[in-house]
Image: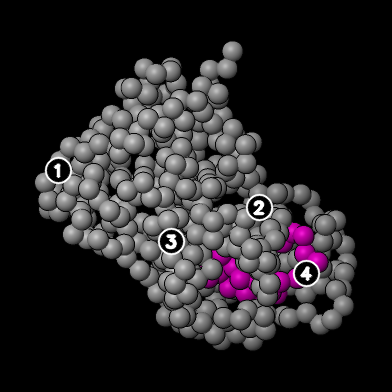
Amino acid sequence: MYNSLFFKTDTTVLAKAAPTTFTSSIPSTSKRAFGKKRPRDIKACIPFYDFIAKQLENETGIEKVPKTSFSLISAYAYAEYSVVTIEARGYWGLTMYCRYFDRDWKELESPVESVVFPAYAIHCCRHPEAAYMSITGTMDGAVDSLVPVLDRTVDDPQYNLSLCLAPMYGDESKWLLLAELIEHYKLQGVQHFYLYIKDIDAYSRKLIDDYVKTGEAEAVYFREERDRPGKEWQLVGVTDCVQRSRHHSRYVIFCDLDERLLTFNNKTLPQQAMTDDPDIASVQFKTRWILRTHKPPSQYEGDETLHNHLPTLVFHNTSAIAPFGHTGKCVVDTRRVLIMSVHYPLLLFPGYEEAFAEEENAYIRITELDCIVLRHYRGQYGDSWAKRWIHQVERFGNFTMTDYPEHLMAPLYENIKQRLTQVYRKS
């Protein structure tokens, strides 16, 4: 039995999952035995269980917030264990039970006792016959939803470098920033995009569907319920993408919709940002802000729209470069990260460390930079960022007028135009 210091029991009845999760009326049938004796708790199967227990004792990553309704995102099977990710907030450290189902939705024997850690994930023992999984608050609690198990058992990544996009939320149109983000990062060597969506307008949804159709992206839609401020969904997406990308992409960039990581001297991100150092889990980069002074347009009307609104073309008022640790972003090897925060890893697996991009003295003129910098096209409207943070940013140095690199602007513009024309202006 687990020490109560690590595992808290919650007897609250879990609410039915949102429609974004695979749902079904689960048939009431007897549980089918797998054969050999199955573990009853994760202590028997998680290779790093002692490390998890220690972090629970230290309250690493704890969220002391009110509970929301309980719903699932996905499940991932690794060689020795599985992980189920959840949308629910306020369950950190609570005891939960991993439930396993075959391809016919029949429950397999032996629920496994576990705990919510980190805040939006539950580590489980792997069941080799499980095609679907669920999570309940008691061993024999009602199962209202299942999620398919994605196979991550083999560490043979399909992609070398991918991008985890923080959940898109709010009512503002997303399509222009999204097209610019994807086409920019494709020029930088990114091969695949994990898109997370909390709120989306129908017009922007068409663009997402097109990128998914071509295989360049996969989209994860969160439930429509607005049970917390939109920005507080960010860690939900980050937590899931750590699992989704693990063994699927060798390296991953974690960034927001308005952030553009850039290399210089015609080098791509794979050439300059990633490392084969066996001890490095992430490489962090500094940030500079480019101020966006008006909202993106609601619809695409050809060249006129791009000439007037494309952030990399239109906005130039640029901050000095922030010091390391101030809202930077990372390229990450998710095999080596247990908890990822918005800006940097919060908890690495033992034996790994973070690295920081070099060439600090080159941050004088962006056109002479022989390294990498994050250009953050930050809007000056709609929230309190300008009032809360602009004065702190000004302390890093004077604002200057900078341009997106000339050798990239022409292909970026043409690629965006081609994609938007394909999606929105078909005859």
Q: Circle 2 sits on which residue?
A: 16
Earlier in the chain: of badge 4 and badge 1, it is 4
From this viewpoint, is residue 343 visible?
no
Q: Amino acid at mark 4?
A: Pro
User: Given this view, does label 3 or label 2 mark the residue nearer the observer?
Assistant: 3
Above or below for 300 versus 395: above
- 66 or 329, which lies in front? 329
Real-space Cα distance between discs 3 and 1? 30 Å
Q: Amino acid at mark 3?
A: Met
Earlier in the chain: of badge 3 and badge 2, it is 2
Q: Residue furthest front?
A: 265
Earlier in the chain: of badge 1 and badge 2, it is 2
Q: Amino acid at mark 1?
A: Phe
Earlier in the chain: of badge 3 and badge 1, it is 3
Q: Circle 1 sits on which residue?
A: 399
Q: Residue at x 51, y 82 (%)?
A: 51
Q: Circle 3 sits on which residue?
A: 274
Above or below for 138 versus 69: below
Residue interval drawn in magenta: 112-134
Q: Secondary structure at mark 4?
A: loop
Quadrant housing the C terminus: top right
Where is residue 238? Give x, y as percent: 48, 57
Above or below for 49 versus 234: below
Mark sitting on residue 128: 4
Q: Secondary structure at mark 3?
A: loop
User: Left or right: where does residue 315 sit relative to residue 8?
Assistant: left
Is residue 259 in the magenta section? no
Real-space Cα distance between discs 3 and 4? 33 Å
Mark 4 residue crowding within 10 angstroms, few (<14) / some (14–19) / many (20+): few
